Image: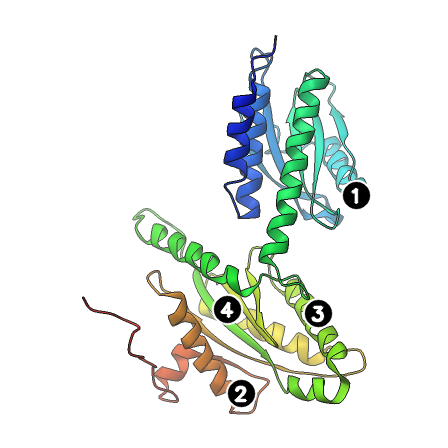
Amino acid sequence: MHRYNTQNILKNLITLTNERDVITLEYSLAQSLFDLISVENTDISKSVVIYRALDIRKNLFSSYVVGNENFENNIPNALTQMLTKCFKTGEECIYAHSGDINATLFPLKNNESRTIAIVAIKNLTCDDQLRKTISMLIQLFQNFIVLINENEHDTLTGLLNRKTFEPKVNKVLQNMQSLSNRKDDIENQIYVLAIFDIDHFKRVNDEFGHLIGDEVLLIFSQLMTQSFRSTDPLFRFGGEEFVGIFACNNSNDIECLINRFKEKISTFNFPQIGKITVSAGYTYISPYDASTQLIDRADLALYYAKNHGRNRICNFEHLVDEGLIEENKKEGDIEFF
């Protein structure tokens, strides 16, 4: 007689579909699956692990675990090979160790049927009914990911769209506020918001047509994705304007990061177009900034870059310190009641 019931499954579904961030959603899935399998054979140690590929060519994986388990901290070579196989084939795999460790590996796929993560359930002993329930829960997760991607990503470039900007930047601000309130915190990361604008893009559309212009935007977005970390939110704000939120240990790292991308664009040969350049303006993020303030400051720095030669990166705070621009204190930024 199975101790899991419809009510518990529905409760897990409610929890799962309450999330919007993909990583958090994966963690919620892991917890839901752990709750589901824990009612069976409680005397056997079980765990659910989410594996993400850091570098599939080097067999490097990160992991998130639910349950009392430690085998994921030092991934055995045989398990690494099985994870790599599961990522490449996109098919369910079984990992069996000579000792008492065994795991069933379930691939998690995006809307392009590409494996984005793997769910490993250790010591999964179940009948067909429970296995079907697990498969259905994973399928529900995948369908939900498709809906999130369609709703939150730009159709042409695949980057985050403008309407996702507010919740994403607010999440960064909340994290910064939380860290600033922790006296024992050892992290000292610097966050910036940058606006990128392709120079003379109107000329591209006028001379080569909008289809070629769209191809430039697509390639530009792909170069952005290659240049920055997967954890850095990248947005297409509209037209030829893009936004990124980045974290580094110091201001020099930030400047090098953005300048490397600028140089990558300027040396890339775009099909039928040849060379193009990009200008950018960026500003440092403080824990209690408003998203509108960040956009206004970065936009002023971008405007300066555009009007002083293009193909350059300008920082708002540096421009203010040097007296090259004045801080734009628009009425309405701060309201007094």
Split into 4 quadrants, where in the image is the C terminus? bottom left
Amino acid on which the number 2 mark rests in the picture: Lys
Q: Residue at x 42, y 57 (%)?
A: 170
**Label 3: few (<14), some (14–19) or many (≥20) C-alpha neighbours in 10 Å:** some
Task: State the residue position of label 3.
Answer: 218
Task: State the residue position of label 2.
Answer: 306
Between the C-alphas of marks 1 and 4, the distance is 34 Å
Which tag, 3 or 4, sits closer to the chain's start?
A: 3
Q: Is residue 125 above or below residue 337?
A: above
Left/right of residue 91 with respect to residue 13 in the rendered view: right
Between the C-alphas of marks 2 and 1, the distance is 44 Å
Between the C-alphas of marks 2 and 4, the distance is 20 Å
Spot occupied by residue 118 in the image (x, y as percentages of width and height): 68, 37
Evaluate if marks 2 and 4 touch, with contact meaning CB atoms under 8 Å apart. Answer: no
Q: Secondary structure at mark 1?
A: helix
Task: State the residue position of label 1.
Answer: 88
Amino acid on which the number 1 mark rests in the picture: Lys
Q: Is residue 129 above or below residue 89?
A: above
Q: Secondary structure at mark 2?
A: helix
Which tag, 2 or 3, sits closer to the chain's start?
A: 3
Evaluate if marks 1 and 3 touch, with contact meaning CB atoms under 8 Å apart. Answer: no
